[in-house]
C-alpha cells in the first residue's frame, strides 16, 4: 500500500498544529478597576522621567499626579493633574514647569496575553499650554492625542493593589521660544519630535486609606 497520501496528511496536520500554537494572541478589551469611589495619587516610579527636545533634555526629581475622587468600579479612562519640582532642563537647575491647568488623560486600549496597553493625551484649557521656562529658552507643549505607548502593570493584592504606568511617548508636539542671545535650537518653530520616557506609580485613596486599583 502506498504510504505517500498518509505522509502528506500527517505533514498537513503537523503544520496546522504549528500554526495554531504560534499564532499571535488575540487582543482583548480591558478596564481600569477600583474599589469604589477613590482618588488617584501618583508619583514617579524608579528613575525620573526624561523629556527630550531639540535644545536638550528635561527631568524632574519630584513628579506627582492627582485625580479627583470618582465613583464606579470600572472605567476606561483616567485623568490626572501633574505637578513638577526640582527640574533640570538644558543643564540648568530648578527650572519651573507651569502646567496651567493642563491634565493627562490615560485611556485603555488592548490586552495582549498579560500585556495591558493604553494611550495618553495632553488636554489643556483653551489658550493654555504647559510652559517650561529655562534660562535662554522657553518650551511650550499644548493639547495633543495618542502619544506613544503606555503599559499598565498590576502590583500588590487586595486593597494594596496599585498600578505602574510605563510610558514611551513619541512625536510630542512643542515649540521652543528663544529670547535675544538665547540658547534654543529653534525659535517658535513647531516641532513634533519630542519624546518622554518614564514610569509612574498610581495608588487609590479614599478618606486617607489605601484602596485597590488594577487593570483587568
Image (cartoon, grey):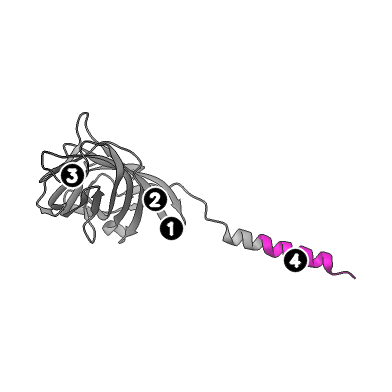
x and y, in percent, of residue 47 in the image: 22, 61
| Residue wearing tag 3 | 184
Q: Which residues are magenta?
A: 1-16
| Residue wearing tag 1 | 114
Of the two numbered discs 3 and 2 on the same chain, state the one appearing first in sequence.
2
x and y, in percent, of residue 195 in the image: 29, 49
Which of the labelled discs sits on residue 10, or is there none?
A: 4
Q: Are marks 4 and 1 in contact (CB under 8 Å)?
A: no
| Residue wearing tag 2 | 117
Residue 161 covered by magenta stretch:
no
Q: Which is nearer the eye, 23 or 132?
A: 132
The answer for how far apart the CA atoms under marks 4 and 1 are is: 34 Å
Q: Residues within 10 Å of mark 2 (few under 14, many from 20)?
A: many
Q: Which is nearer the eye, 55 or 66?
A: 55
Residue 9 covered by magenta stretch:
yes
Asked whether residue 11 is in view, the answer is: yes
Observer-side mark, 3 or 2, equals: 3
- Say which residue appears at 52% left-offset and 55% top-offset: 25
Of the two numbered discs 3 and 1 on the same chain, state the one appearing first in sequence.
1
Of the two numbered discs 2 and 4 on the same chain, state the one appearing first in sequence.
4
Of the two numbered discs 4 and 3 on the same chain, state the one appearing first in sequence.
4
Amino acid at each position: 500500500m502506498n504510504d505517500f497520501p498518509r505522509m502528506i496528511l500527517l505533514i498537513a496536520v503537523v503544520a496546522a498544529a504549528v500554526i495554531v500554537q504560534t499564532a499571535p494572541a488575540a487582543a482583548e478589551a480591558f478596564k481600569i478597576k477600583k474599589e469604589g469611589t477613590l482618588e488617584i495619587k501618583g508619583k514617579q516610579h524608579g528613575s525620573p522621567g526624561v523629556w527630550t527636545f531639540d535644545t536638550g533634555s528635561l527631568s524632574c526629581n519630584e513628579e506627582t499626579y492627582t485625580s479627583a475622587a470618582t465613583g464606579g468600579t470600572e472605567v476606561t479612562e483616567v485623568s490626572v493633574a501633574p505637578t513638577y519640582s526640582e527640574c533640570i532642563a538644558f543643564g540648568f537647575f530648578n527650572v519651573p514647569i507651569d502646567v496651567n491647568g493642563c491634565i493627562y488623560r490615560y485611556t485603555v486600549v488592548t490586552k495582549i496575553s498579560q500585556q495591558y496597553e493604553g494611550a495618553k493625551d495632553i488636554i489643556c484649557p483653551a489658550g493654555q499650554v504647559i510652559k517650561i521656562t529655562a534660562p535662554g529658552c522657553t518650551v511650550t507643549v499644548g493639547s495633543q492625542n495618542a502619544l506613544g505607548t503606555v503599559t499598565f502593570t498590576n502590583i500588590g493584592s487586595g486593597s494594596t493593589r496599585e498600578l505602574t504606568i510605563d510610558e514611551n511617548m513619541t512625536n510630542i508636539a512643542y515649540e521652543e521660544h528663544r529670547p535675544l542671545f538665547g540658547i534654543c535650537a529653534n525659535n517658535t518653530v513647531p516641532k513634533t519630535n519630542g519624546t518622554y520616557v518614564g514610569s509612574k506609580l498610581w495608588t487609590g485613596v479614599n478618606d486617607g486609606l489605601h484602596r485597590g486599583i488594577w487593570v483587568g
